Image (cartoon, grey):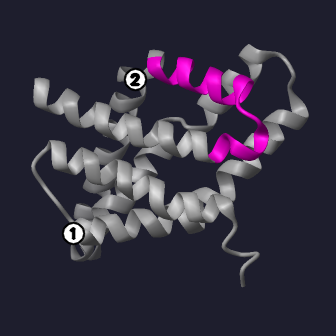
């Protein structure tokens, strides 16, 4: 069991919900369910798939900008939309029973994913360049999770400034 709860899973369990909790605090809200859901997503989903992709990048590409583009291609608007859908499922779990409401929520998540991706593309390029080219492979998931937490705070501040 201890091999299952490796460093990346522990980081995912803590860092993703912590960054989101700070973002929620900036916006004056709090949701224990959301914190728990993002902890589980970070530990079980993100800690499995992200290190795998970072390892693939490391094995396949050597040029710094190609590695950066490969990371950004992975964290695309659909990845962001899935993250929003995880949050939405926790905040309004029964709304997905109605097919038309569920499709509307999926469409909204994709729209937000595209908007978030485009709005932060410069920060994403810089952050992913550093993560892929300056951080050792075994520490990239933690660095990426910390970057995502920072982006949650950035999005919260952006919302307040509108």
Residue 5 picture location, percent across and down: 66, 73
| Residue at x-position 17% and y-position 60% | 30
Which residue matches tag 1? 92
Label whose residue precedes the other's in the sequence (1 or 2): 1
Residue 104 picture location, percent across and down: 25, 53
Residue 128 painted magenta: yes
| Residue at x-position 22% and y-position 62% | 101
Image-based side of 105 in relation to 71, left or right: left
| Rendered position, 156 above or below 134 | below
| Rendered position, 39 above or below 63 | below
Image-based side of 49 in relation to 95, left or right: right
Mark nearer the viewer, 1 or 2: 2
How many marks on residues? 2
Which residue matches tag 2? 120
Which residue occupies the foreground of this view, 25 or 89?
25
* Main secondary structure found in the magenta portion: helix
Q: Classify 10 Å Cα crowding around label 2: few (below 14), some (14-19), many (20 and above).
A: few
Residue 9 picture location, percent across and down: 61, 64
- In the picture, which quadrant includes the N terminus? bottom right
For residue 162, say whether it is visible.
Answer: no
Give residue 53's mark: none
CA gap between label 1 and label 2 equals 27 Å
Residue 137 in which image quadrant: top right
Which residue occupies the foreground of this view, 95 or 41?
41
Q: Secondary structure at mark 2?
A: loop
For residue 13, say whether it is visible.
Answer: yes
Magenta residues span 123-141
Q: Classify 10 Å Cα crowding around label 1: few (below 14), some (14-19), many (20 and above).
A: few
| Residue at x-position 65% and y-position 32% | 71
Q: Secondary structure at mark 1?
A: loop
Residue 133 painted magenta: yes
């Amino acid at each position: 069991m201890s091999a299952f709860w490796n460093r990346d899973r522990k980081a995912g369990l803590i860092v993703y919900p912590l960054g989101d909790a700070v973002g929620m605090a900036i916006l004056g809200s709090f949701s224990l369910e959301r914190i728990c859901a993002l902890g589980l997503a970070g530990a079980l989903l993100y800690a499995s798939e992200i290190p795998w992709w970072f390892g693939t990048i490391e094995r396949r590409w050597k040029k710094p900008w190609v590695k950066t583009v490969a990371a950004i291609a992975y964290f695309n608007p659909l990845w962001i939309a899935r993250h929003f859908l995880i949050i939405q499922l926790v905040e309004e779990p029964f709304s997905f029973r109605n097919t038309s409401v569920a499709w509307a929520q999926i469409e909204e998540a994709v729209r937000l994913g595209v908007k978030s991706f485009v709005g932060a593309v410069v920060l994403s390029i810089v952050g992913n360049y550093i993560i892929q080219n300056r951080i050792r492979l075994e520490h990239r998931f933690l660095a990426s999770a910390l970057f995502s937490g920072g982006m949650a705070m950035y999005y919260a501040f952006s919302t307040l400034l509108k």
